Amino acid sequence: MSRIFSAFISILLVGAFVSCEDEYIPKPRGYNRIEFPEKSYITYDSIYPFTFQYPAYAKVLPYQGSDGPHPYWLNIYFPKLKATLHLSYLGIESENELIKMIEDSRRLVFKHTVKAEEIIENYLDKPGKYGIVYELTGSTASALQFYITDSTQHFLRGSLYFNVATNPDSVAPVINFINKDVERFLESLSWKLK
């Protein structure tokens, strides 16, 4: 009887060790690795009433929307990162018009409140350049928006959108990478006299 009992215990112990090795543990979903290009910049100086620097791995394209011509609107397209920075320029004719442009810009940002976890406002205040950079966190369509103005003649609004469906966790490294390009854009932006 003790032999049978010893054999039974041995089988149970071997079974316990073997079953531990076969235990299935699901792995979390992963994302593709993103190879970021090296940072280098090109100065854009054309017929537009402003100049700026943009990344060498991006393309500056004229705006082509269905809402008619806008002569000084541009898109900075990041093909490998599947993102576009939309730029809308307007000339300022009066103080009331500037106030309306700022309010319109703010309204467009806060349309994302439904999906945004947080909207962070970073104020710009440099000689000849004033504005706000809005960082939007959460499952928003746009992760970054801004406006910049000299408060007398020039007003420029920007918004970053991805050309694919996004998940905040998967695009966070790309947003951080492009944020540096937007910082460079804003630092290098220079207004032309009218």
Image: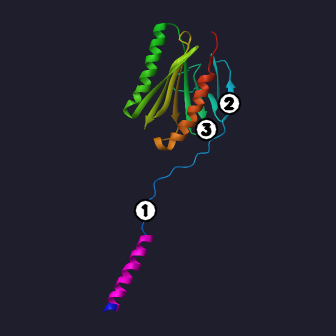
C-alpha separation, residue under disc 1 versus residue under disc 2: 46 Å
Q: SS for tag 3? A: loop
Between label 3 and label 2, give the one nearer the viewer: 2
Q: Residue at x 61, y 27 (%)?
A: 184
Asked if disc 1 and disc 2 are in contact, CB closer than 8 Å, the reply is: no
Split into 4 quadrants, where in the image is the C terminus?
Answer: top right
Q: Which mark is residue 25?
A: 1
Q: Which residue is mark 3?
A: 79
The three-letter amino acid code for the residue at tag 1 is Ile
Answer with mark 3 or mark 2, whichever residue precedes in sequence. 2
Most common SS among magenta residues: helix
Q: Residue 87 occupies which quadrant of the picture?
A: top right
- Residue 40 placement (x, y as % from top left): 68, 33
Q: Residue at x 63, y 18 (%)?
A: 190
Which element carries disc 1, helix, strand or loop?
loop
The span shown in magenta is 3-21
Identify the residue at horizontal 60%, vertical 33% (top origin): 77
Q: Quadrant of residue 193?
A: top right
Image coordinates for residue 84, horizontal then vertical, percent: 56, 33
- The answer to whether residue 167 of the structure is visible from this angle is no
Please check the rendered image and state whether residue 17 is part of the magenta-colored stretch, yes or no. Answer: yes
Q: Nearer the viewer, residue 27 or 59?
A: 27
Is residue 144 a member of the stretch shown in magenta? no
